[in-house]
Amino acid sequence: MNPVRSLDQLVADLRDRPSRRVAVAAGHDPNTIGAAAHAAAEGIAEVTLVGDASRIAGLCAEMGLDADGFTVVEESDAVAAGRIAVDLVRSGRADVLMKGLIPTSDYMKQILDKEHGLLPAGHVLTHVTVVELPAYVASHGKLLFVADVAIIPAPDLPTKVQILEYCIAAARSFGIEQPRAALIAATEKVTPRMKATVHAAEIAEMARNGEFSGAIVDGPLALDVALSPEACRIKGLKSPVGGNADILVFPNIESGNIFYKSSTLLSGARLAAAVVGTTAPCVLTSRADSEESKFLSIAMGCRLVG
């Protein structure tokens, strides 16, 4: 399997695979409808919009889209629409869940519901983002997989281990046979005053003991040495990951979220993201996200389907 090195390649590769079934919770939102129509037109997804059918029809008319390109399930109440969409995935009638015009808190509650949700017992729910940074593509010719930027505020050591494992699985699903994972901190020096460095060192030791198959893991690494061979040279750092990371595991949500937003607002990055740890990929996007970002996140969800 050739590794996916750009988000355009992700979409192109999916055209040659069987399409996946996507269920959208409260799908009466213009950007979501536009993204879903794009995915259907590319042949990568068969989309079911659970939502207000009249609003969906009206939006499709305004946008010049054919409403017959979707399956529409009528439910005007957003929370009830979320329950129906989750049930479509849980029952095997859909492969990917997607958030539409439903509050994030309600969407997450339904995913996490112990009886009717999508999170297996003992699993951590986390958010994995694929970042296409122009500078990193130019220098390294590849994507970055980063976590967690949206869900877990302050992951403890066992949680970071699961986040790392999810990132490794996502990278491998993109054809990266042995992804390099950097455990990010402010410095490469381990100091008890900085818990991130202690956690990173412990996870790196686990990796040296063979606990993460199919990946190369190292840390603590500051962001510059994780991504820049020149920074490694200047600092005299020798690391199997340094300067060439595929995966960045952040110590907390603040650092991850700042990287995520800086990448888009200041560096022109393109993004795709999904919630993982669940029985099926769940696309979680913001109302402020562009139609392209939502489309690419659908593509990522389809790629992650086992």
Image (cartoon, rainbow, N blue to C red):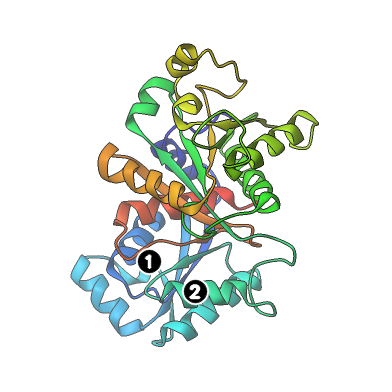
Residue 108 vertical placement versus 262 (above, below): below
Q: Is residue 206 left or right of residue 164?
A: right
The crowding category of the residue bearing disc 2, from other C-alpha atoms within 10 Å (few below 14, some 14 to 19, many at least 20), is many
Q: Which mark is residue 69?
A: 1
Q: Which is more toward the observer, 23 or 150? A: 150
Name the spot of residue 208 as percent of width and height, x first. Answer: 76, 28
Name the spot of residue 252 as percent of width and height, x first. Answer: 52, 50
User: Is residue 117 shown to the viewer in this render?
Assistant: yes
Q: Which is more toward the observer, 98 or 147? A: 147
Residue 43 vertical placement versus 120 (above, below): above
Residue at horizontal 27 percent and vertical 45 percent from the top: 265
Secondary structure found at label 2: helix
Q: Which mark is residue 107?
A: 2
Q: Is residue 177 left or right of residue 296?
A: right
The crowding category of the residue bearing disc 1, from other C-alpha atoms within 10 Å (few below 14, some 14 to 19, many at least 20), is some
Secondary structure found at label 1: helix
Cα distance, mark 1 to mark 2?
Answer: 25 Å
Image quadrant of residue 73? bottom left
Residue 89 vertical placement versus 7 (above, below): below
Q: Is residue 8 left or right of residue 245?
A: left
Q: Amino acid at mark 1?
A: Gly
Name the spot of residue 155 as percent of width and height, x first. Answer: 60, 54
